[in-house]
Image (cartoon, rainbow, N blue to C red):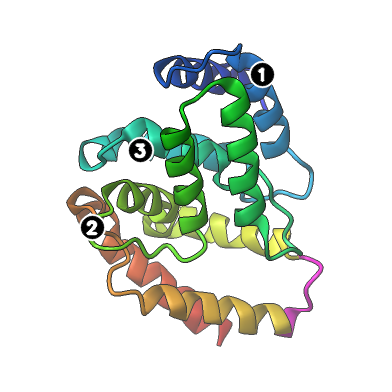
Amino acid sequence: MPATTAAALLDRWTALLDRCGATADPEPYGRDLLKRWAEPQRRYHTTDHLLAMLDHIDTLAEHADDPDAVRLATWFHDAVYRPDRSENEERSAQLAVRALVEAGVTRPLTDEVARLVRLTVSHHPEPGDRNGEVLCDADLAVLGGSPAAYAAYATAVRAEYDFVPEDAFREGRAAVLRQLLDLPALYRTPTARTRFDAAARANLAAELKQLA
C-alpha cells in the first residue's frame, strides 16, 4: 500500500471517528484496520477496495439515513478476511463492536455498524433499509465497471482463492454469480441503478458464460 494512500485513508478515518463522537484517539484503531486491509492473503479485498467503497458512499450518501454509519461499516466489513473461512462477516462485526465501544462511539451507532457489516453476507437489505442499501450498492459497484475493470476484479478474486482447484472454483463462482443475478435488484438506490445495473448484468453474464 503506497504511503500516500495509507495517509489519506487514515485522515478519512480520523475525521470519521471525530464526527461520530469517539472519545479515544482514533489513530491506533485506524492503523490497526489499515494493517488488516493490507494482509498478504488479500488480492481484491485490499485498501483499494476500501478506498473505492468510501468514494462510492460519498456519491450515494444522499440515499442513506446515516452516511457515517455506512462509512464505519465499510471500514469494518472485511476487516477480518480469510478466503478459506466462512465466518468473516461475523468476526468483522464482532471486531467493530469491540473497537467502537472501546473508542467511545455510542452503543446505538455501534450496533447499527455491526448490523450493516452482517448484512454483507447476503447483500439483501430489507425494503426501507436506506443505510443497508447504500452499503450494499457501494460494495457491489465493482460489478458495474468497464469490462477491463471487471476482468481485473475477477482475476483478483481468483487469486484470493488460488488454493481451490479450478473445477471447484468454477462451480462455486458460477453459483455466486447466479445468486447475484437472481437478486430482486442488484442495486437499490436510484443513483447506483442508473450508473451500474446494465453494465453489471452484462459483466456477470459474460463471466458466467466464460466459466461454463
Q: Alpha-carbon neighbours of circle 3 within 10 Å: few (<14), some, or many (≥20)?
A: many
Determine the secondary structure under disc 2: helix
The N terminus is located in which quarter?
A: top right
Return the residue nearer the eye: 141 or 93. 93
- Check the image and report above or below for 172 versus 141: below
Q: CA distance from mark 2 to mark 1?
A: 34 Å
Q: Residue at x 32, y 34 (%)?
A: 67
Task: Name the kind of residue labelled 3 in the image.
Answer: Ile
Marked residue nearer the N-terminal end (3 or 2): 3
Disc on res. 173: none
Check residue 71 for magenta coloring: no
- Find disc 2 in the rendering and name its residue: 193
Q: CA distance from mark 3 to mark 1?
A: 23 Å
Q: Is residue 198 visible?
A: yes
Part of the protein shown in magenta: 162-167
Residue 80 pos. (x, y %): 68, 47
Q: Can you tell which quarter of the image residue 167 is in?
A: bottom right
- Find disc 3 in the rendering and name its residue: 57
The C terminus is located in which quarter?
A: bottom right
Q: Residue at x 53, y 60 (%)?
A: 151
Task: Name the kind of residue labelled 1 in the image.
Answer: Ala
Task: Name the kind of residue labelled 2 in the image.
Answer: Arg
Q: Residue at x 63, y 42 (%)?
A: 46
Q: Residue at x 22, y 56 (%)?
A: 128
Disc on res. 3: 1
Determine the secondary structure under disc 3: helix
- Check the image and report above or below for 145 versus 177: above
- Check the image and report above or below for 149 versus 113: below
Marked residue nearer the N-terminal end (2 or 1): 1
